[in-house]
Image (tube, rainbow, N blue to C red):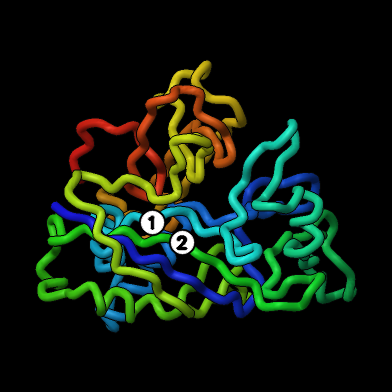
Amino acid sequence: MGWQAYHLTYRAVTPIALGAYCFGFIQRTRYYAPGWTLWGAITAQLTRAILPRAGGDDYETIGHFVKTNLPTSYAYILVDDEPAWPQYREGQLYYGPLSAAEFETRFVTSFGQTAIAPATFTAHTGTLHETELLSPRDQVGGEPVLWRFTLYVRQPWHNSPEKLEGLEVQKVLDALEHLTLGGDRGYGFGRLVRGEIQGREDLGEGEWPRPLDWNPQERVLRAHVELKDLAGEEVRGRAEPIVRRLWQNDPGEGTWGPGQRREGHLLYAPGSRVERANWQPLVGPLGIWMTEGDHAPT
């Protein structure tokens, strides 16, 4: 099986909410889009483009196809036309050339909300909350904010379902002209429109692709890596728990809904540095990096 890489650049049309954790009544945002967030956005967009009358089972089928055949890098905001990768310098966290404070000044905004008690025209007690957002414009210079990620394409497709018979790579790229990313999409947040496509770049054979954003000299993570793949003394940086809620058919009831299955993981965060000199990652399902080895496609 061979791999191709396409580098996709998007312009943010609306603010983007990439929920990280709550700090008091503030819902913090991530400053990049993880691979599992891109997986959800690509699955939704591709399903609607290819199967206009799709139901829940179709989204599940396409989601498995995307996970197996279309893994991605993480998506990062561009600063000076380069991804604002997190990294530690002299004990401080930077995003590209910007300190965390400088990045927040330029790209992070917020949206306050509360629930109203109609009878009294007052706010319900305890409902005031604030959501951090990534702005669609640089708040210092005013320029549109650009995002970039790499789409890895397996050719030929592995375990392609019958309903996707004859699907070509160009049709996938056409379907991804627009993406809706992150949370609070009902408010109109998360809209991206594609600009430049760079590629195709042929990466050769392999069960999973090697990440193009891995620098073996710097050895800084550009995606999450599960703790089981690297011993603690081999990484300098930060680890975090990730709990993902997946939509899945309930085999008992046959209904479709959220929260049918949850998965908890402990992962090293992007920006951490790997101390093992010869470590080579692979891009796995949902964009999470894996230690190179015998990782067969699911």
Quarter of the rendering containing residue 175: bottom left
Q: Residue at x 39, y 40 (%)?
A: 289
Q: Amino acid at mark 2?
A: Phe
Q: Residues within 10 Å of mark 1 (few under 14, many from 20)?
A: many
Label 1, secondary structure: give it.
loop
Q: Is residue 80 left or right of residue 68?
A: right
Residue 22: mark: none
Tally of marks:
2
Q: Nearer the viewer, residue 182 or 270?
A: 270
Question: Residue beneath label 2, please?
Answer: 149
Quarter of the rendering containing residue 60: bottom left
Label 2, secondary structure: give it.
strand
- Report how far apart the C-alphas of labels 1 and 2 lie in the structure: 7 Å
Is the residue 174 above or below the residue 233 in the image?
below
From the top left corner, tell me how far across and down residue 185 is, in percent. 57, 71
Is the residue 17 above or below the residue 27 in the image?
below
> Dots 1 and 2: beta carbons under 8 Å?
yes
Q: Amino acid at mark 1?
A: Thr
Is the residue 275 above or below the residue 29 in the image?
above
From the top left corner, tell me how far across and down residue 191 is, in percent. 55, 76
The residue lying furthest to the front in this view is 217
Q: Residue at x 74, y 62 (%)?
A: 108
Q: Nearer the viewer, residue 132 or 208?
A: 208
The residue lying furthest to the top in this view is 233
Instruction: State which tag comes first along the sequence, 1 or 2.
Output: 1
Asked whether residue 255 is in view, the answer is: no
Q: Is residue 214 left or right of residue 164?
A: right
Q: Residue at x 78, y 60 (%)?
A: 130
| Quarter of the picture holding the C terminus | top left
Q: Is residue 288 left or right of residue 168?
A: right
Residue 72: mark: 1
